[in-house]
Image (spheres, coloured by chain):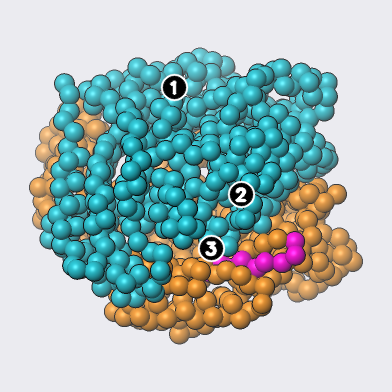
Chain colours: A cyan, B orange
Amino acid sequence: MSTPDRSGELLTIAERVVAMAKPGEQVEAYVSRGLSTEVRVYEGEVEHFVSAQSEGIGIRVIRDGRTGTSYCGTLDPSQIAEVLAEARDNLGYGEPDEWSGLAEPDGVAVVPQSLWDDSLENTTTARKIELAKLLEKLTLAGDSRVRVDDSNYSDAFGEAAVATTTGIRVAGRENGCYLSVGTLADDGDETQTGFGFAVGRNVEELDLERAAREAVDRATRLLGATKPESRRITVVLDPFVTAQFLSIIGGTLNGESVVKGRSLFANRIGEAVANPLLTLVDDPTNPLAYTATDIDGEGLAARRNALIQDGVLQKFVQSSYSARRMGMAPTGNGLRGGYGGSPSAGCLALQIVPGLRSQAEIVAGIDDGILIQQVQGLHSGVNAVSGDFSTGAAGLLIKNGTVGAPVREFTIASTLQKMLLDIAEVGGDLEWLPMSATGVSLVIHDVTMSGA
Amino acid sequence: MIDNDILERVLAEGLRTGADFAEVFASDWRGTGVGLDDGKIEQLSTGRNRGAGIRVIAGDTTGFAHTADLSEAGLMAAARVAAEAARQGGGGTKVIALTTQPSRIVSPIKIDPSTIGKAAKVDLLRRVDDAARSAGGAISQVSAGYSDGRTRIVIANSDGLVAHDERVRTLLRVSAVANGDAGMQTGFDSLGHTMGFELFDKVQVEDVARAAAGRALTKLKARPAPSGSLPVVIKAGSGGVLFHEACGHGLEADLVAKGASVYKGKVGELVASPLVTLVDDGTMTHEWGAIAIDDEGHPSQYNVLIENGVLTDYMWDYLRARKEGRPQSGNGRRQSYKDLPMVRMTNTYVLNGEEDPTDIIKDTPNGVYVAHLGGGSVNTATGDFVFGMTEAYLIENGEITEPLREGNLIGNGPQVLRDIDRLGNDFAMGNPGTCGKDGQGVPVGDGQPTLRVKSMTIGGTAS
């Protein structure tokens, strides 16, 4: 059975709001609706089953350079009228900004994406529960030292529409499913933790064996870990860690932080900011990306943007506001955090151009180093304005080309500027991860490890 | 918001598939946010979110559904979904008679922010911008946010409880950038209370702005933080997050029950320095984590978790307390009507010690003095935690000397608790925080007097 696309209904609601614009006003309406299911299994039983529905509308009104916004979590027509009136009232308190304004169609063609899979709609609740139970069972079978904290199945569908007085009118929908398992591994008094996950557009795409294997491996490989001595060292970031590092770098390549004087890389377009081994692109049109999309949060076509090419800074990602203010072309990078938020510039799907060698081949060439398998506290130890980078970490020491003893409770530190220049190799082991950046093994020289 | 007779029918619907507990949590939130950046009021935004979450428990299985439709039909539909999700065979009817709980006020509100004109809120941020920019010529950028919110809540359950609450929170955040020869530095400060607009009669927003700007300016002269283990002195009111991460999360009964806490099975044992008495206190008037009732309708409490170093109890919600056959502790909280409640902290703090804080610094030949902390995180199963220092200095020969650049500190919770060897008499609460767990954020507070940890690993780059 195929479910009809009802995102057109949302577009009708958005257009109705836009039609109420008064002369001299720019109006944008963003309307969204979603439904999600979450099953949590523990010790073979369903611990909870959550069925969540949400809907809402956010309205922006701009007049004489002043912006007002308002939103509410319902599509009830009487409420929508109130939201528009509120947004209009609120703009009276904003201050004029000559660059404020809504996105305008820029002629860039939409690259169609397959973001919807009918078969997920037809997956029964029993099947969802069975998958979470199976993942728990597979994980427990992987190693007798392993316990499972929780095993989860979740899926979500979302549809959204944007219409503006500047001529934007787009609507779309997407769905997907996700499995995850949290693990604990015990050895005597010691406990370590791990996790595994699988993602797909439908349940057939979910790789349970791999999720179970990784969850077991992540928890058990740190058993017996000790605290390393403090020193400077070469690090190899596991693909999952590299993806988190790239997300931070992506956050600094942002036109809004440039125009507001918060970017490390302002005025450096055309300069070498990284080792020539690094080529970084933001490409939401690549269907392999977890965050692939056809349109951005302001209704412009999502597109491929090369940000760093062979170490040279090429471009910042832009919202329509920052593009206008910098006098640059839009890049289709307006991000929106749901109906309650205003769009802001951000990367949609970061990808690093992979190198050639596997992680094993890379490690074989390192005499003294450390393989970083997990990081903790990036949100508290990294400052994207000053560039200071310090994070808790755990991993395996590398000696004479082989990985050995596990280590934990230490930090690795440097600065973002220096780390980009200190990149020594980009691995060929590209992984598509459930986040807005891909991962590869990444070698960085001269990082400070702080431990005992 | 919803009449008792409707609540009774909805709860009965929730129990129809044989469940043993049903609950309705309805809330209606309205809020205002104003953002200033780059010298301009960028926008004023108002919003409203209301709806109800319905929880049905059958044995060990919880079913949950939520709806933005607060009509009887909408609530009944959600109750059916939740009941179906928790289906336990059987079925039947049960009559529910609700008794409204007397209302309880922990944080009385003088001035409801929704009665204050939008212009007054905008004016606060203009004052912040002026004060931060006048703090020093090197201040190159300021962003600030004001927000207020009022939530009306109704909680009813099949045990016959109906409780109402109204929560008002007001928050100001200031972030400044200073530009110097060695690049840019940032400074942050915030002010948040479970209080109305009278907050700004008590505190001058200029002080918050100057604190943020001061941190950015101080760090322009900062050198890289040390790398390795050193004694760490933490200023009063800036290190509560250490306890939140080092042990608070590990004392949440849901994590303990699954064996995901290093504190499992340790009640009655010495888990910290005998100097440490740790409390989680939802009743602390006007603090950011204060609540009159938790999100399951249970009155908030003053709970002693660690007394003179000995672990006395964990924190509890309905589900975990029911399993253990013991009372709840007022720690069942959720982010919104869209979320299931979990065991969460409220205001978590260490009680005063006896020492003069200046003596603690004087007796530290070499170390790090942390004057302001950023966020942190913990792995409760291993106890390993990190937190970021956003304002810190070297201690040399018993004196606070040079400022340090930012970095994380890392430690192991049980080890750090044992390594607290000095405790001051200058207790203060810290900045308002948002605690994240399982994807949900809730407002929390923390506090402590000046204290010293014998040794912690500092994640800088200087040898």
Task: Give above or below for A300 relative to A289.
Answer: below
Tell me which segment is drawn in magenta.
B173-182
- Chain under callout 2: A
- Chain under callout 3: A
Q: For the image shown, how many numbered marks are present on the structure?
A: 3
B443 magenta-colored: no
For the point 82% across and 64% down, which residue is it?
B395
Q: How far apart are labels 3 and 1 at the CA level?
A: 48 Å
- Quickly name the residue at label 1: A136
- In the image shown, does A21 or B102 lie closer to the viewer? A21
- Chain under callout 1: A
Q: Secondary structure at mark 2?
A: loop
Q: Are marks 1 and 2 in contact (CB under 8 Å)?
A: no
- Quickly name the residue at label 2: A269
Query: Could you tell me if residue B252 is visible in this image?
Result: yes
Q: Are marks 3 and 1 in contact (CB under 8 Å)?
A: no
Q: Earlier in the sequence, mark 1 or mark 2?
A: 1
Task: Give above or below for B20 relative to B31.
Answer: above
Q: Earlier in the sequence, mark 3 or mark 2?
A: 3
- Dot 2 surroundings within 10 Å: few (below 14), some, or many (20 or more)? some
- Dot 3 surroundings within 10 Å: few (below 14), some, or many (20 or more)? some
Task: Give above or below for B373 relative to A276.
Answer: below
Q: Secondary structure at mark 3?
A: loop
Q: Secondary structure at mark 1?
A: helix
Q: At label 3, which amino acid type do we have?
A: Lys
Q: Which mark is residue A260?
A: 3
For the point 49% across and 39% down, which residue is it?
A305
